[in-house]
Image: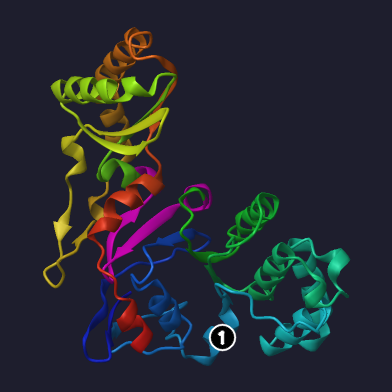
Amino acid sequence: MDFAVRGGGKRQVIQDLWFTVRQNEAFAFLGPNGAGKSTTVNILTGMLNQTKGTATVCGKPPGHPEVQRLLGVLPQYDTLFPRLSVHKHLRAFAIIKGVPLDKVDDVIQQAANDATLEKFMFRKVEQLSGGTKRRMSIAIACLGQPAVVILDEPTIGVDVCTRRAIWDMVARLKKSTSILLVTHDMDEAERLCERAGIMINGSLVCLGAPQRLKALFGATYLLKLQFTDSSQIARALAELESTIATMGGNTRVSQQGESHLELCIDMRAAATTSVSSSPSSSATAVTEGLQLSQAALESQVQAHAPFLASLLRFVSSKRAEFAITDWSLGEVSLGELFVQLAPHHHMYQEEEAVV
């Protein structure tokens, strides 16, 4: 997909956007508020028309009548009728989606089972909890086993238990459906999606498996330290920065509090510099063909082994001196990658509102 949308003639809201969601794949679509994610979803659902380029769903333009039967959409906020029951909602939307009348009851039962809604079927929406309403909205989006489902912030505003239940639903769903998951939850993206794309300034700046994105950009490791004496944090930070620099790495403070410190460590591996700049955009894009192979990633980790061993020895030897009570060293999260890219984003909320 590669298209552009102009916002009120002022500026391109989306430019050089290209990605494909593969069959039976969950693809995470990430980006700050105002990056153009909602505009993209509106184009894919046929609510907006692009000014140039091509967008397709199952090989057909979004406005094609067949697409309406092939596509399921979960909006960011539940759009339900308070005085109608769960059963009436599912039945109405099944008919709207073109499910044959002799199969409607079976489709409703399957949706209820998938979303664990059996005991709520004849309750009115106004009697349901927020988490149950969210599961119901997902069930509606998945009625009739659509080929593609767009989930816009599926776990927004739900508790931990409901969040896990929704994750289980998505994991089952992607066995037979292609999923575009729009989310700000990096843990959600890493757990559920085979690939992720991050949108900044209306352009896709990187795309690939979460592990590859973390290797391609910025800090690779995250060092977490807990102190009993807060006065030692500054000394510990200065010495860590100096020591890591001599090992060939860069550091950045991710979090710092009264008793804890988190450092992102970038080893600047030569293998992570395969990026190219789009001639029509100032944003940097990483194409799938330039992503690191799994063998290259494993080689990179092996190359960092001496550094990791040295860092572990250094921290262990300094625990008493800096009053360190607990510490850990691990891979950086996809969320931290997002934090690194987000400062380069310029808000386009006004343009999106115009569109």
Q: Is residue 3 above or below residue 172?
A: below
Mark yes or no: residue 283 visible: yes
Percent position (x, y) of residue 53? 27, 83
Residue density around tag 1, few if under 14, some if 14–19, many if 20 or more, within 10 Å: some
Number of on-image labels? 1
Helix, strand or loop at disc 1?
helix
Quadrant, the N terminus: bottom left
**Left or right: 222 in relation to 163:** left
- Was residue 66 drawn as part of the magenta stretch in this picture? no
Q: Is residue 128 above or below residue 230?
A: below
Residue closest to the eye, 353 or 51: 353
- Picture quarter containing residue 333? top left
For mark 1, what is the residue?
68
> What span is colored magenta in the figure?
188-211
- Picture quarter containing residue 244? top left
Q: Is residue 113 above or below residue 322?
A: below
**Left or right: 48 in relation to 232:** right
Residue at x 33%, y 70% (from the top left corner): 35
Mark yes or no: residue 292 visible: no
The residue most toward the front is 231
Percent position (x, y) of residue 277? 14, 61
- Was residue 207 drawn as part of the magenta stretch in this picture? yes
Percent position (x, y) of residue 264? 30, 35
**Left or right: 309 in relation to 155:** left
Residue closest to the eye, 118 or 108: 118
Residue at x 19%, y 34% (from the top left corner): 269
Percent position (x, y) of residue 271? 19, 38
Type of amino acid under label 1:
Gln
Residue at x 73%, y 84% (from the top left corner): 81
